[in-house]
Amino acid sequence: MTSAYSPEANLSETERYVLGSLNQAWPSASTMTPDVIESEDNGRNPALFVDTVQTLSDNGMILYEAFLTGAASGPRFLDTMITARGKAALQSTDIDA
């Protein structure tokens, strides 16, 4: 787990993908599921998804209303939104790229 981010911090590819997805949906809230980070490299990894979303939330880059999980549905974060800090971090990675 990563410690507190500054907006200039290096984000992982997964964190950039989550922030990018939320940035595209902004100003609307989204329900986030592991499908959001599904790729050929990591497959559908619920533990990685939960860790990524929780780390971004702990560092003030996203907000969510509720975390739900179930055997049939898997983990879901309801009403998830990117924050100004998350937008700044995402923009700083675009500038560096």
Image (cartoon, rainbow, N blue to C red):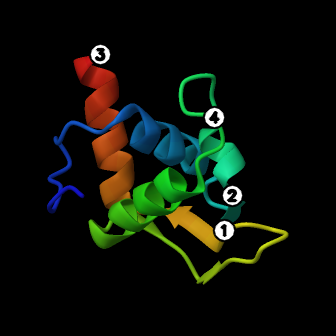
Q: Earlier in the sequence, mark 2 or mark 3?
A: 2
The tag on residue 33 is 2
Instruction: Give the residue displayed 30% in from the left and 58% down from the top.
Output: 85
Give coordinates of residue 93: x percent, y percent. Answer: 29, 30
Q: Helix, strand or loop at disc 3?
A: loop
Place residue 60 in its image quadrant. bottom left
User: Mark 1 or 2, which is nearer the eye?
Assistant: 1
User: Mark 3 or 4, which is nearer the eye?
Assistant: 4
Q: Earlier in the sequence, mark 3 or mark 4?
A: 4
Q: Answer yes or no: do the residues labelled 2 and 3 have beta carbons within 8 Å?
A: no
Give coordinates of residue 96: x percent, y percent. Answer: 23, 20
Q: Answer yes or no: do the residues labelled 1 and 2 have beta carbons within 8 Å?
A: yes
User: Which residue is at the far top?
Assistant: 97
Q: Which residue is mark 1?
A: 75
Instruction: Give the residue displayed 21% in from the left and 36% down from the top.
Output: 10
Q: Residues within 10 Å of mark 3 (few under 14, many from 20)?
A: few
Q: Which residue is mark 4?
A: 43
Q: Helix, strand or loop at disc 2?
A: loop
Q: CA separation, marks 2 and 3?
A: 27 Å
Kind of residue at disc 1: Pro
Say which quadrant the C terminus sits in: top left
Q: Please give left or right for residue 53 compared with residue 67 in the image.
A: left
Instruction: Give the residue displayed 59% in from the left and 41% down from the top.
Output: 37
Place residue 72 in its image quadrant. bottom right
Q: Earlier in the sequence, mark 1 or mark 4?
A: 4
Kind of residue at disc 2: Thr
Q: CA separation, marks 2 and 4?
A: 13 Å
The tag on residue 97 is 3
Up-down relation of residue 24 to residue 48 (above or below) = above
Up-down relation of residue 96 to residue 63 (above or below) = above
Relative depth, front residue between 45 and 27: 45
